[in-house]
Amino acid sequence: MGNLDDAPCEEQGYAENGNGKAAATPISNGHTPKQWMNHAEEQQPHLEQGEIKFSAPAYTEIRTRSGGLNFKTVNAGSYHPAQQEASNGYANKRVNGSSRQQPKLSQADGILSAEQEHYQKTSFEEVPLHTACLTYLGFYLLMILGYINQLLFVPKVATEKKREGYVTLYDAFESFYSRYVYRRVRDCWNRPICSVPGAELVLKDRVTDDYGWSFRFTGTETRCLNLGSYNYLGFAAATGVCAEESEQRARDNGLAFCSSRSELGNTQQHLDLERLTARYCGVEDAIVFGMGFATNALNLPSLLGPNCLVVSDEKNHASIILGLRLSGATTRVFKHNNMRDLERVLRKGVCYGNPKNGGKPWNKIMIIVEGIFSMEGSIVRLPEIIALKKKYKAYLYLDEAHSVGSMGPNGRGIIDYFRANPKDVDILMGTFTKSFGSAGGYIAGSKVSQSKGFA
Amino acid sequence: MLDNIINFANYWWFRYLMVTELYVVEKWERVTIHVIFMLLFCVFWYFNYSIMLSMTSNLLGYTPLLANMLPAMSPGQGVKGG
């Protein structure tokens, strides 16, 4: 969300530091760290060290880009509409009705023909064959070496004793994989972080002397671009409007009710949140839950029963798969984002009915897809799916965990992105964890599906 | 000139290590894998040399030039005997 474009400003800030000018340029997650403002002069001696660090290839690349684009203000390079509003990078101004009246179109809309636009919106780079083969080759080599290692050496970690009458905690392959394969590349991902994961984050440096068995901290830190976590809109920053308001709300109302809504009942905050969520999604009603994963895993069983057919994308998230298993519904999987395959599965389901019930029709047929597939990053072909759903009279469950807030000209998710009608999607599911930097999830839809338990 | 060649070789050696994930493993493991690769290469080379070559030359009806100079040899033996 504008990370790359904001970063150069920081770079220029460092460059100006040489002239004795304070580097008070906001960093891209929208705040100026206090220590930088206060110790701008103290930074002078560290500049050489900083220069070495920022001459790393990634930063050089950014600096090159900033040379080409001459932004007049800090936010000029940011394409995020919310960041244009507020100087500190937060959408803290309530947008007036006047600008909200007309739905804003994204820059890509309306330039190409409808067909090309749709192609561009859903295009996804296929993995080239040679890349796939070489990746497999690398993994096979690591596995072979891992097995040789396991044969020859005793691992330098605590091993599970095989005690009588106890089930082992890890199965053989799991412990093998984590010790001898994953351990080597562990340092690529499991790095200790010592800042808020905003547009940039600070990692604690560490080195290993024994190929990943143990690590030792060097005492230094690395500031780097964050390309690998949620908080898409930067709401989960340590300072700023969101942080202050959350703190104030927590002081006023407490952190938790320590019990479920079914036991203690609703509060006005629950109702407000649900009403706001429904308005945001453009549907009649919404219901919120305290956990994103559980929203899928525990609500799908209440929507589906044994005489239901679920047509599920093969790359759906584990929470959906768990929910489908718990529900007892029959699940048919179609190829990832493949509309031809989806139609084949749907047609078969409609034609042949439930084989366990003597071929009688299913109670309901539900298509379950994600907006942005969390494991792939691909975007669902929503218009085609809505067409198919109408053709075969199926229900559509759209998991917008990653897309809500981050897609579309108004940030309302994948429906906004395709300019579809929210009423065409029967159940909208989403989480507050990703874009909104909070916790929990919601299910939104028409009132009928909410109150009557959806058929 | 020499530097360029060394740079080029280093670059491709680095890519080779990256692609085969050998950059994360210990030295002796890397050597083991290289030895296995060399063995595989040799086995393939010998297979091609002894079997594929004679087979294809038989199929194409091609007799090696050497056959004219060497003592009589059945074509099925190919260059193996030579």
Image (cartoon, coloured by chain):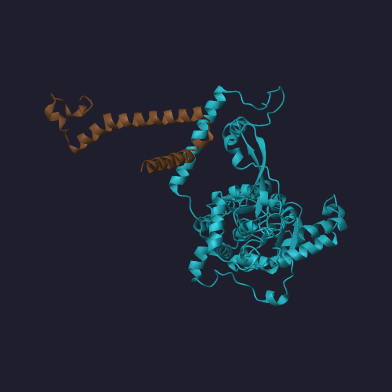
Residue most extreme to the bottom: A98
Q: Estimate the x, y position of residue A330 in percent, counting from the top left.
A: 61, 49
Query: Measured along the vertical axis of the image, is residue A438 above or below residue B51?
Result: below
Q: Residue at x 62, y 48 (%)?
A: A48
User: In this view of the protein, which residue sits in the foreground, B67 or A431?
Assistant: B67
| Residue at the far front in the pictured view | A19
Query: Along the line of sight, which residue is nearer the eye, A372 or A388?
Result: A372
Viewer-nearest residue: A140 or A282:
A140
Residue A287 visible in this rendered orientation of the protein: yes
Q: Position of residue B8 (x, y in %)?
A: 40, 43
Question: x%, y% of residue A249?
Answer: 83, 58
Chain (cyan)? A
- The shade of chain B is brown
Q: Is residue A139 above or below residue A363?
A: above
Quarter of the image containing the N terminus of chain B? top left
Residue drawn at x 68%, y 45% as measured from the top left: A193
Q: Nearer the viewer, residue A353 or A240?
A: A240
Q: Name above or below for residue A137 compared with residue A368.
A: above
Which image quadrant for residue A182? top right
Q: Is residue A245 left or right of residue A64?
A: right
